[in-house]
C-alpha cells in the first residue's frame, strides 16, 4: 500500500503546486489584461487630445485658413472689415517643460523638446453695430484657437452713435514637430553607418 500510495501522494503534491502556480499566472494575466485595457483607453484619450490641440494650433500652413475664417466671421456678423493683418510669425524651439509661449527664448539650455512654437500676430480692424462687433469677438473666441488677446479696443466710429469701431490684436500659437536640419540628418545617417 505504501509503495502504491507514495507515488500518488507525490503526484498529488506536484499537481497541487502546479495548480497554485497556474492560479498565480491567471491572476497576473488578468492584471495585465486590465492594464492593457486601461493603456488602450489612455492611448485613445491622448490621441483625441492631440487631435483637438492640432485643430486649435495655428501653424504657418494654417494661416490662410485662419484669415479666411476671420473674414467669414466678420461678414456673417454684419460688420464691416477695415483691415486684417497676420504677420509671417516667429518660431523658436519649445522647452520640454516649464515653457511659456510669451517668452522669446527657452527658459534654460539643454531643455529643448522636439517641437517648435510658432506665433503669429493678428490685427483685426472692423466696425458695425455693437451687436455685430460683439458677435465677431464671440465667434473668434469660439474658434478655440491657441491664442492670447494682446489688446481689444472699442470706440465710437463715424457720425452714427450706434456705430462701434473694433480693433483686436491677438497672438496665435501653434506647436509643430521640429524638422531636423540638414546637418542633423547627415550626422544621424553617419552614426547609423558606423554602428
Image (tube, rainbow, N blue to C red):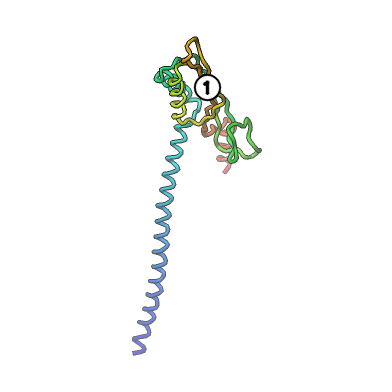
Seen at 52% across and 34% down, the residue is: 177
Measured along the vertical axis of the image, is residue 192 above or below residue 163?
below
Residue of label 1: 168
Position of residue 31 measured from the top left corner of the image (x, y, whole percent):
42, 59
Position of residue 171 measured from the top left corner of the image (x, y, whole percent):
54, 26
Viewer-closest of 115 and 18: 115
Position of residue 39 measured from the top left corner of the image (x, y, whole percent):
43, 50
Q: Quadrant of residue 16?
A: bottom left
Viewer-closest of 157 and 83: 157
Position of residue 153 measured from the top left corner of the image (x, y, whole percent):
54, 21
Q: Residue furthest top?
A: 159
Quadrant where the C terminus lies?
Answer: top right
Task: Count every numbered label the image shows and give the total.
Answer: 1
Q: Residue furthest bottom?
A: 1
Q: Which residue lies furthest to the front in this view?
A: 161
Measured along the vertical axis of the image, is residue 77 above or below residue 3?
above
Evaluate whether residue 184 shows in this view: yes
Mark 1 Cα-neighbour bin, 10 Å: few <14, some 14–19, many ≥20: some
Asked whether, in this view, residue 73 is left or right of residue 178, the answer is left
Measured along the vertical axis of the image, is residue 111 above or below residue 153?
below
Viewer-closest of 20 and 90: 90
Measured along the vertical axis of the image, is residue 33 above or below residue 113?
below
Viewer-closest of 39 and 187: 39
Helix, strand or loop at label 1? It is strand
Evaluate whether residue 68 shows in this view: no
Q: Quadrant of residue 114?
A: top right
Seen at 41% across and 74% down, the residue is: 17
Q: Quadrant of residue 100?
A: top right
Quadrant where the N terminus lies?
Answer: bottom left
Amino acid at each position: 500500500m505504501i509503495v502504491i500510495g507514495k507515488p500518488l501522494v507525490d503526484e498529488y503534491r506536484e499537481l497541487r503546486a502546479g495548480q497554485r502556480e497556474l492560479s498565480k499566472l491567471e491572476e497576473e494575466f488578468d492584471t495585465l489584461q486590465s492594464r492593457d485595457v486601461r493603456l488602450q483607453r489612455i492611448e485613445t484619450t491622448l490621441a483625441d487630445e492631440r487631435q483637438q490641440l492640432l485643430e486649435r494650433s495655428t501653424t504657418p500652413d494654417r494661416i490662410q485658413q485662419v484669415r479666411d475664417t476671420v473674414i467669414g466671421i466678420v461678414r456673417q456678423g454684419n460688420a464691416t472689415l477695415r483691415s486684417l493683418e497676420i504677420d509671417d510669425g516667429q518660431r523658436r524651439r519649445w522647452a520640454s517643460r516649464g515653457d511659456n509661449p510669451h517668452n522669446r527664448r527657452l527658459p534654460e539650455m539643454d531643455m529643448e523638446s522636439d517641437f517648435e512654437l510658432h506665433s503669429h500676430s493678428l490685427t483685426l480692424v472692423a466696425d458695425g453695430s455693437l451687436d455685430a462687433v460683439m458677435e465677431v469677438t464671440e465667434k473668434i473666441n469660439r474658434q478655440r484657437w491657441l491664442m492670447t488677446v494682446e489688446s481689444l479696443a472699442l470706440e465710437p466710429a463715424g457720425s452714427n452713435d450706434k456705430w462701434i469701431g473694433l480693433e483686436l490684436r491677438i497672438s496665435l500659437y501653434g506647436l509643430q514637430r521640429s524638422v531636423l536640419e540638414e546637418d542633423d540628418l547627415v550626422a544621424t545617417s553617419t552614426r547609423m553607418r558606423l554602428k
